[in-house]
Every structure is written in structure tokens, then in C-alpha cells.
Image (cartoon, rainbow, N blue to C red):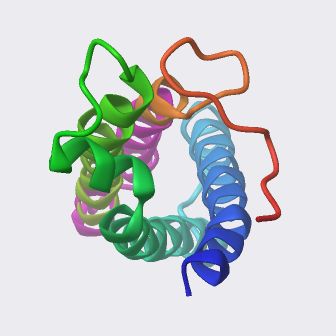
Amino acid sequence: MYITLLFIHSIVRWLVLASLLYAIFRSARGYYNRAAFGKPDDRSRSLTATLAHIQLLIGIMLYAQSPWVKAFFSGSAKISENIEAFFFAWIHIGLMTVAIVLITIGSGMAKNKTRDRDKFRTMLLWFSLALLLIFLVIPWPFSPLANRPYLRLL
């Protein structure tokens, strides 16, 4: 089950990033061009939030089964000896959850706005903040805290 979740996670995380980038692009274009907020814009907002929530659920399931997290909370991995276990036990899960909360807030606020320009501005602001936070806590291959390859097949 853990391997299957890792595989699904590898796919969904790229879908989240792609949909977030697309939604930010659409909202920036709509805001600066003073365009009408149409169905494609609403679909990109909704799809981004939905994918982010799916990713959160997969992440929580992986978190509960993670050997890094289990080692950290069992006391066998000290922070000073293994920063990677600390990163996944606290930093990654915490800040990724905050990023998904930002996406959720931005999506809900944009949905409730009445003016099109306000919808675009709200999406642009909240989704951009979430993307920035996500980029900060992704375990990039070059990260000193924890590193993973760009594409993990297992």
C-alpha cells in the first residue's frame, strides 16, 4: 500500500503544481487584461483546490506510514543526527498543510466575490502565496534539509 501511495503521490504532486501554475497564469492574465471571469477560470480555481485536497489526503496517509516520521517519533532519530526525519516529521507536513489552507481560502474567497477583477486578484494573491510556500518546502534534489529526485517511481 505504501508503494502504491508513493506512486500516486508522484503523479498528483505534479498535477497540483501544474494546475496551480495554470490557475495563477489565468488569474494574472484575467486581472491585468480586465477580462470577464468565465467558466474556464472557475474550473481552474476549483480543479486546483480539489487536486490540492486530494494531495493533502495522500500526504497524510503517507505521513502516517513514513519510516522517517516513525523513526523521529520513536526517538531513534535525533534532530541533530537526522535533519531529514525532522524535516518530514514537522516542517514539510506543517507548511504543506498551510499552503493547502491558503489555496482553500483563496478559492473560497474568489468564489464569493462579485466583481470579476476581484476574483482574479484574490486567486492571484492566495494561489501565488501558496505556490511560494510549496516551493520552499519541496524536498528538492539540491535541498540541504531533505532531498528527493524530481520523479520518484518507487
Q: Position of residue 83 (x, y in %)?
A: 38, 21
Q: Where residue 17 sits: x, y (%)?
A: 64, 50
The answer to whether residue 60 is left or right of residue 67 is left
| Dominant secondary structure of the residues highlighted in magenta in the image | helix
Q: Position of residue 28 (x, y in %)?
A: 60, 36
Q: Residue at x 40, y 39 (%)?
A: 130
Q: Quadrant of the N terminus?
A: bottom right
Image quarter for residue 98?
A: top left
Q: Residue 148: within the magenta?
A: no
Indicate left or right for 151 with 4 as reference: right
- Location of the C terminus (image quadrant): bottom right
Q: Nearer the viewer, residue 84 or 101?
A: 84
Work out whether residue 76 or residue 135 is closer to the camera in this orientation and state it. Answer: 76
In this view, the residue farthest toward the front is 76
Q: In this view, does 67 lie above or below 147?
A: below
- Is residue 42 left or right of 121 when viewed as pictured? right
Residue 3: horizontal and vertical position, in percent? 65, 76
Identity of the residue drawn at 54% across and 29% down: 135
Examine the rendered structure and indicate whether residue 82 appears above or below residue 121. Answer: above
The residue positioned 78% from the left and 38% from the top of the image is 149
Q: Which is more toward the observer, 43 or 66?
A: 66
**Residue at 28 percent of width and 12 percent of height:** 80
Tell me how many marks there are.
Answer: 0
The outermost residue toward the bottom is 1
User: Eyeballing the image, is 89 above or below 84?
Assistant: below
Range shown magenta: 109-132
Q: Would residue 127 be counted in the magenta stretch?
A: yes
